[in-house]
Amino acid sequence: MKGSPPAATIPEELSTFPGEDRILLFNPHSGGYMVLDDLTWDYVERIRQGETLEELAGTLAKELNIVEPEAFARIYELLDTMGKRGMISMHQRTGLHPPSFVFIEVTRKCVYPCRTCVLSAGKPLENELTYAEIKDVIDQSAEMDAQSIVLTGGDPMTHPDIMDILAYIREKGRTPGLSSSLLNLTDENAQRLKEMGAAVQVSIDGTTEEVDDWNRGPGAFNTSLKGIDLLNKYGVPWRLAFSITTKNVEQVEGICDMAKDLGAFQVALRKVKWVGRATNIERDELEPGAEIMADIYKKLYRKSLAYKKDGEKFEINAKYNSVLFSGRGQHPLELNCGMGRNTMHIRSDGVILPCSVFSEFPDYYLGNVRKDRLLDIWHSSVRLEKLRRLTVDNIESCKECDIRYLCGGACRAEALVGHGDFMGECGDCEDVRLYYHSIFKNILETSTPISIGIKGGSQ
């Protein structure tokens, strides 16, 4: 209908980055982007404001001195291009969904004194959950319909019943996960991991024994490599995870290549969080500067593009890169970490948390599995509801930021624990702003703008 608004819906969360005589539009839902000239941007704005096709075509015809059928054709061409480039809104999901992941810290015990450990793990907590209580937590997680139950620590491989716990997760129809240094992994246990369909995360912080052992302690590097050999021997899928510090900053790309060459399906990385044991080190001695981090993200972005071009299935899971490839999905206003929406964390003494980083902050405790049921907490917790209401449009430090829909509020827990203000900036903010602005500046400078003022210019 000529008197109707266009059927396409352009998302309210569209992010804009102006350049000289052009503007870049980025859709955080899909990761799609376009560079437009100023005239075309004016018409996109008119579409967003609800002008009808008849109004749009009439205005364009007068402005360009063309006949209305040609103006209609150019508007339809623009809308078609926007659809093909992922600029049209997705239906937003509504309602509360079961968590994708429940993380169960089966023990705080760990033999490696990692300098960057968020939990300062080492000795077990007092009154840790028994085997029977851990099984009850798994029952409750299944009752919530959590898709995956991941065992963490400390190092869960130090728990005497670890393999039976993982098997019980599979028995309950959930996907078992394990995050470990692979200490004490044997042929028998590796085979069991394969049989139960477990996925494993291994942490290695360098390409050399010297760099990795600086953080994790003597012997950690070789222990993990031996464990990886066993995972590969029995075909257990695994990914490598690490934190970026001043000690390994020159090896970041090398760690990614090492993970791929060793057989990982993915490498996951982030800048070190200045919480837990990391606070024993001067911050500027541990954290790379913002320009260094922005440069790392750019290098990993290019490396990811190269992997995709070569048809590699291996993925680099760099927190702030994924939005550029596939967007943030149905609701980019939400915090990107899934806290309160997709994840729940159980401490080894039963304390229920929205995120492990809140481990020593009682104001964020949600209850204890010894007296509270997870399903009730998930649906009725006042604290969780407050967290769910948080969006990048109502966090004080985010609401005026032009990249808020891309970064998703960064890490609120780190903003509190590392910087003292839950609603303030976190340690990633400056890094990510520099990174995204650099990427978009390059796109603006190297792209030919789409132009509704030229016949065929919107293709």
Image (spheres, rainbow, N blue to C red):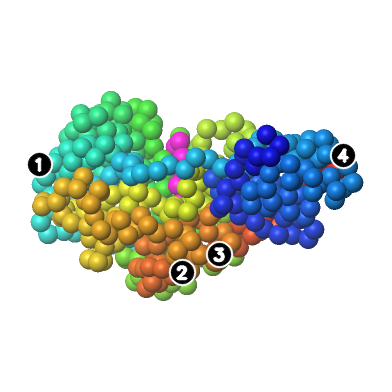
Q: Earlier in the sequence, mark 2 or mark 1?
A: 1
The residue singled out by tag 2 in the image is 396
Q: Nearer the viewer, mark 4 or mark 2?
A: 4
Type of secondary structure dominating the magenta stretch: strand
The spot of residue 85 in percent (x, y) is 66, 39
Q: Quadrant of the C terminus?
A: top right
Q: Quadrant of the N terminus?
A: top right
Whole-Å distance between the Cαs marked 3 and 1? 48 Å
The residue singled out by tag 1 in the image is 132
Q: Amino acid at mark 4?
A: Val
Q: Nearer the viewer, residue 163 or 30?
A: 30
Q: Amino acid at mark 2?
A: Glu
Horizontal side, residue 244 vs residue 42: left or right:
left
Using the image, tell me which numbered label, if any, was put on residue 67. 4
Q: For the point 10% across and 52% down, which residue is it?
A: 371
Question: What are the residue bounds of the magenta stretch?
Answer: 264-269
